[in-house]
Amino acid sequence: MNWEVTRTFISEMPSTRSMLSTGRHLFWSNSETVERRDLQYGVHERQKIDIYEPVDVHDQTETILFIHGGGWETGSKDIHKFIGRTWARHNFIAALTNYRLAPEYTYPDQMGDIAAALSWIQDNYDNFTGSLYLAGHSAGAHLASLAGFSDKWRKQAKLKVERILGFILLSGVYQFYPFDKADPRVRRFLGQKSYWEEAQPFNHLKESCPPVFLAHGREDGEVFPKQSIQLSEKLTEMGVKNDLLLMKGAGHMELLLDTTRGDSKFWSSVEDFFGIR
């Protein structure tokens, strides 16, 4: 676990219930899911996907591509096993992808990886039904939203907008501060200022955007809730179906960990929004 994640955990003190639930699903597999690990979608060692399937995959089982966070510089699908194992229990096929990391690799390399992962799923995954959800946490929510909002990246991924059933975006970054005031991680991720406007998901919104479910912890001090609030307001103004869950008492990591609990308000809200009970 890197220092940034450790610092966030220490500052937030996630609830015991969320920590225990996450730990149980992180370190132990279960009989309710089938795991396919380290499927290669490119030649680089980071270009790999893990897929977690319910034991009973049927016509109503949809695919979610989940993209991990870590400030574009850290993180791995491997430390998010708890996402694959618990989201699959909600009758989703959860595909967790890695991507090349900054500062060694800068934008648009990460987006090229996400597009390649999406292409691989469509062309090579035998249980792909033809449609999917795009999901992510923190920097991963940024990449997921940009992949779906931007015509450029959907075209590169060979993903038609009507194939996107919706977005499930947690604690994401959708707009950047002015270049001279931005978090150093954003500047390192972009590499150069010329990509500043292109790399902001907020700048690619259209009325044809699929439904967007947003969740953010009210006490998030790492990515401020106004990122999700302002995106929700803009989507509403454009007539795009969306919902925003602001979780009281939750910080940046607590929100993610809470998704591992079967009784979480997160799941009841997601299922109500998309009508997938």
Image (cartoon, rainbow, N blue to C red):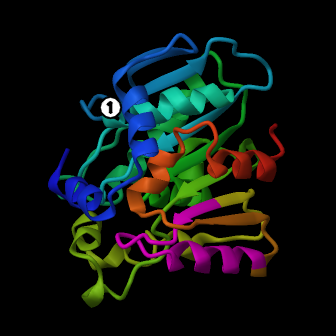
- Picture coordinates of residue 1 (x, y %)? 20, 44
**Residue 213 horizontal side relative to residue 224, left or right:** right
Residue 157 in the image: x percent, y percent?
A: 55, 43
Stretch of the chain drawn in magenta: 214-236
Residue 209 can be seen in this image: yes
Residue 143 position in % (x across, y down): 46, 56
| Left or right of residue 153, residue 233 in this image | right
| Label 1, residues with CA under 10 Å away: few <14, some 14-19, many ≥20 | some
Residue occupying the point 62% across, 36% down: 262
Residue at x-position 60% and y-position 41%: 158
Q: Quadrant of the C terminus?
A: top right
Left or right, residue 269 beside residue 184? right
- Which residue is outermost to the front? 16
* Residue 87 is a magenta residue: no
- Please name the residue that numbered disc 1 is placed on: 78
Where on the picture, by quarter, is residue 79?
Answer: top left
Q: Is residue 233 magenta?
A: yes
Residue at the spot 41% in from the left edge and 79% down from the top edge: 176
Q: Is residue 1 above or below residue 129?
A: below
